[in-house]
Image (cartoon, rainbow, N blue to C red):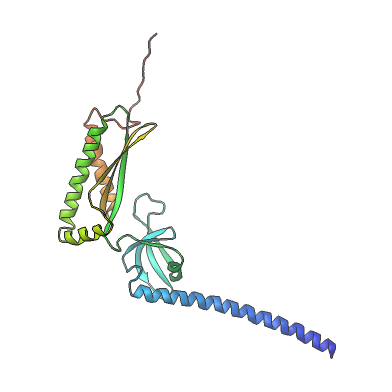
């Protein structure tokens, strides 16, 4: 009887441990399903984003193409590109990740993002003239943007910008570095046209710099100084 009792208790302990293990696995599975369901209900109410929004989460950037009970699907952007262009891949991300990681929506409130171009010119260049060129080109671009794409939404845009105490005017930055003077201009872009706008402004600015003999980018020429005794 004692031997039978010992064997039975050992088997009972094993069964209990096995049932606890199965229970823990089921609990984790149910927790994951419950989290996915909760987030799905919020996505249906467009709390985080909606289909075709451009978002970034956990290092992944893309355009949302599908929302399901367990996951949402994105068309991947950038990754190994510097430009925000489609890679051709599709990413499926569990809904519950939205409860753990911050999500960035590129067009959640304003359909405007900010981009920046920069140029480093030689210390003996006319930096004031270079800054004036940046100002002229960037202001002309912003004027066209506001009176073109946002011509019917000027008041709405200005109202939303006021919430952040901000303006859509371009911002110039001048910085002195060991190799020269770095000039930057920060400007607003429509959220899907960042790379195209940056390329367009670079072309215009570089053409103007080329026409100015007093402005020289660092590294464009090799200067040799002949010192005679």
Task: Please state which of residues 113 and 22 is positioned toward the viewer in this rendering.
Answer: 113
Residue 69 lies in quadrant? bottom left
Residue 136 placement (x, y as % from top left): 19, 41
In the drawing, does residue 229 fall left or right of residue 190? right
Residue 188 placement (x, y as % from top left): 26, 51
Residue 77 lies in quadrant? bottom left
Determine whether 174 is above or below 32 in the image: above
Residue 64 lies in quadrant? bottom left
Q: In which quarter of the image is the N terminus?
A: bottom right
Determine whether 137 is above or below 61 in the image: above
Q: Which residue is drawn at 18% across and 54% down?
A: 146
Q: In which quarter of the image is the C terminus?
A: top left
Determine whether 125 is above or below 142 in the image: above
Task: Please state which of residues 165 and 4 is positioned toward the viewer in this rendering.
Answer: 165
Residue at the far right: name it: 2
Residue 65 placement (x, y as % from top left): 34, 67
Residue 224 placement (x, y as % from top left): 36, 20
């Amino acid at each position: 009887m004692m031997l039978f009792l010992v064997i039975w208790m050992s088997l009972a302990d094993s069964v209990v441990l096995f049932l606890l293990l199965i229970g823990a696995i089921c609990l984790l599975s149910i927790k994951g399903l419950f989290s996915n369901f909760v987030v799905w209900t919020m996505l249906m109410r467009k709390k985080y984003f909606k289909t075709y929004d451009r978002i970034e989460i956990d290092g992944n950037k893309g355009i949302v193409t599908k929302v399901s009970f367990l996951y949402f699907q994105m068309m991947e952007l950038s990754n190994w590109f510097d430009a925000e262009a489609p890679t051709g891949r599709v990413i499926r991300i569990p809904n519950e990740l939205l409860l753990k990681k911050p999500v960035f929506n590129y067009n959640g409130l304003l359909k405007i993002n900010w981009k920046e171009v920069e140029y480093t010119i030689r210390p003996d260049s006319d930096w004031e003239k270079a800054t004036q060129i940046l100002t002229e080109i960037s202001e002309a671009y912003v004027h066209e943007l506001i009176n073109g794409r946002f011509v019917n939404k000027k008041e709405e845009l200005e109202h939303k910008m006021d919430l952040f105490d901000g303006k859509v005017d371009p911002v110039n930055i001048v910085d002195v570095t060991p190799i020269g003077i770095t000039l930057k201009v920060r400007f607003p872009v429509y959220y899907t046209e960042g790379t195209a706008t940056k390329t367009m402004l670079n072309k215009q600015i570089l053409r103007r710099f080329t026409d100015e003999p007093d402005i020289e980018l660092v590294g464009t020429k090799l200067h040799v100084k002949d010192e005679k005794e």
